[in-house]
Structure formats: structure tokens, C-alpha cells
Amino acid sequence: MSTFEYIEIEDPVFRDTSRERNEADYVLVQCNDYDKVPINLPHWKPSPVCLSTNFTRVAETIKRMEVRPDDVWIVTYPKSGTTWTQELIWLVCNDLDFQKARDLPLDARFPFIDLSGIRDLPESFNPLRDALEMPSPRFIKSHLPPAFLPDALWTVQPKLVHVRRNPKSVAVSYYHHSVSLHCYRGTMEQFIRSMMNELVYYSPYHRYLIEYSELRYPNMLSLCYESMKRDLPAVIREVSRFFGKSYTDTQIQQLAEHLSFDRMRQNEAVNRREWVEFNLRQTARTDKLDDNNMQFIRKGEPDGWKRELSDDLVAALDRWTLDNIPDSKYSHLFQ
């Protein structure tokens, strides 16, 4: 049996309308090689994951890639505070070298290895190749669920950081991200309905968070986006302890100010404005070039969904979460 199986999406509504929303390349991917994943779920078998037909380009390379003991990995469902946490981790691990962080784009410091598996990229831009060739210590980002990550991760056990975020905030942020970065052409309601049908990249969402919560991986730090918003200095101290670093209160405050959303929005090394502009021009949406929603770092508000979602969608998202939590012990993951 092959490591990955590619399954056509059969949902008739999705199939009839996918091309108009720019989702024609979406496919379900089943991982059949998962025995090495140290997960504490009885009779566990990973669910098919919504990805792109492009995933064939990187699937086996990622699954078989070398993992080094001094690697640093971040794994998140999209729009869960990934970029924010990447910048935090990199600076904590690199002695708060703010100048280098300004000079070198985050993509170069912390490559996103599965990116070419979901979309076409310029020929010169190959994050997976960059990660494979990087000198140690490497910083690596992925949105893949546990079964899709390198088998060697589970034996080498480098530092692994996972970040989660409230599903309603994720849904709104993921919609805007998909419009600006993935050339999505549907409405917010269409996107969120697709998300609830597990038909957006990297879904199923609840299964994703539950699997990471049940990993038996001694070198993992689990963070929560909402906790970062409430008390960022406390999270900086937690991350510093995890990486064996110690900083003064003044240094922690300096890092917290660097990571403020106003500063992050203005930081060209992390806010991929050139990608947004490229995509908007490619899809003839230049009228949105001045739209603040078209920023990679957009608003970062923990409760911004309250202003953007209808009451019907809020109720539907809440039902979706209740229907996908097999045990109340997981409720805290989705608050």
C-alpha cells in the first residue's frame, strides 16, 4: 500500500462550485503509514486531510526527511498565531537579535516546508529545499497533522511547538488569508461552510487539535493564541524556559513590544505584503490593494469574529464544535 492515497472530493455542491471559488485542485489525502506516531488514541487511524493535488510534490520528501536533534519545529492549524509565534521563537533562540530579524525575512529564517504542496510558487522559491539545505540549528514550520510529519521526528525528538486558537477566530482569519494568499474567490459564508464540511486546506480542524493534544512527545510545548493575547510577557517567559534561555524583565518587555500587532503589521520581514499584492494583481482585484483585511498580519483580535460573523454562522460554528468533540476533556482546546 502506498504511503499516501489521493481521494477525489465527492461532495456534489463542492464539485459543482469549486472552480468558481478557485478550489479545483483540492483533494483528500489519506496517510497509510502512521504506526510510528506516538499518539494516545485507542484504535487511532488518521482521517483524510484536505490538501491540494500539488501535495504529491512534497509528500514523500517530508515524510522521509532527515530530522536533527537541534531542529526547532512549529506545527499549527493555519491562522492560529503561527507567524507571531515563529518570530517569538526565533528571537528567543537567537539571543534577541532584532537586527538580523529585521534584515532577514522570516520565510528565510523559518521555512514553511509544505507550502509548495498546496500552491504554485516562483521557481526560485522552494522552502522545502531551503529547509533540507539549512545549516543547524534549523527552524521549520508546518501546518501538517502528526501522521504527515517526518517519521524521524518521533525518534529524534527535537523541540516541537504547537499553537492552537479558538475556531471562530480561526475561521474568520482563515477566510481573509485565503482571499489574499490563496486567491479564494468565494464569500466568507461559503468559506466557513466549507470549513465546517472539512473542505479547506489542512482540515479536519478539531481532529487536528485533538491529535496534537494526545501526542506522547516529551519535547513539545503547547501554546494558546488567546493566552498570548492576554499576557504575552508570561508566554515569552514560558517559551524562554522551554528553550533553556533566560532574559531580564527589560528584555522581555522589549520583545513583547517588538511582537505587538502594530509593530508586526509594519514589519516587512514578517508581513508578506509582496505576496498579497502579487495575488491581488494576478486575480484582478487591485481595488483591494489598500484594504487592511488584505494584510498577512491583519488584526489579531481575539474576539474580532463577533463583528464579522452573523448569528446564524456563530450558532453553526458552535454546533460544529460540539459535534466534533468526542469527550468533554477536549473542550478547553476550542475555547
Image: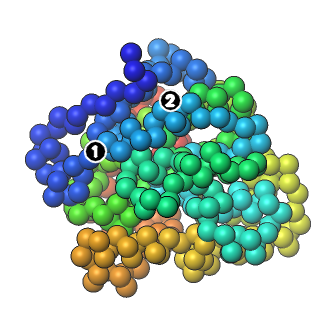
- Image height check: is 95 above or below 14? below
Colouring of the image:
rainbow
Of the pair 238 and 145, the residue shown nearer to us: 145
Identify the residue at horizontal 86%, vertical 54% (top origin): 245
Residue 5 percent across, percent down from the top left: 34, 27
Can you see residue 125?
A: yes
Q: Secondary structure at mark 2?
A: helix
Q: Give the amino acid at mark 1.
A: Tyr
Mark 2 Cα shell of 10 Å, populated few (<14), some (14-19), many (≥20): many
Identify the residue at horizontal 17%, vertical 54% (top origin): 19
Residue 112 percent across, percent down from the top left: 54, 52
Identify the residue at horizontal 31%, vertical 42% (top origin): 53
Can you see residue 293?
A: no
Mark 1–mark 2 Cα distance, whole angstroms, equals 19 Å
User: Which quadrant of the rendered structure holds the N terminus?
Assistant: top left
- Image height check: is 221 above or below 255? above
Q: Give the amino acid at mark 2.
A: Ala
Of the pair 100 and 85, the residue shown nearer to us: 100
- Image height check: is 159 above or below 295? above
Q: Secondary structure at mark 1?
A: strand
Residue 23 percent across, percent down from the top left: 24, 52
**Residue of label 1:** 26
Identify the residue at horizontal 57%, vertical 24% (top origin): 37
Q: Upstream in the sequence, badge 1 or badge 2?
A: 1
Q: Which mark is residue 6?
A: none
Position of residue 100 in the picture relative to residue 114 (left or right)? right
**Residue of label 2:** 147
Of the pair 157 and 190, the residue shown nearer to us: 157
Residue 69 percent across, percent down from the top left: 76, 37
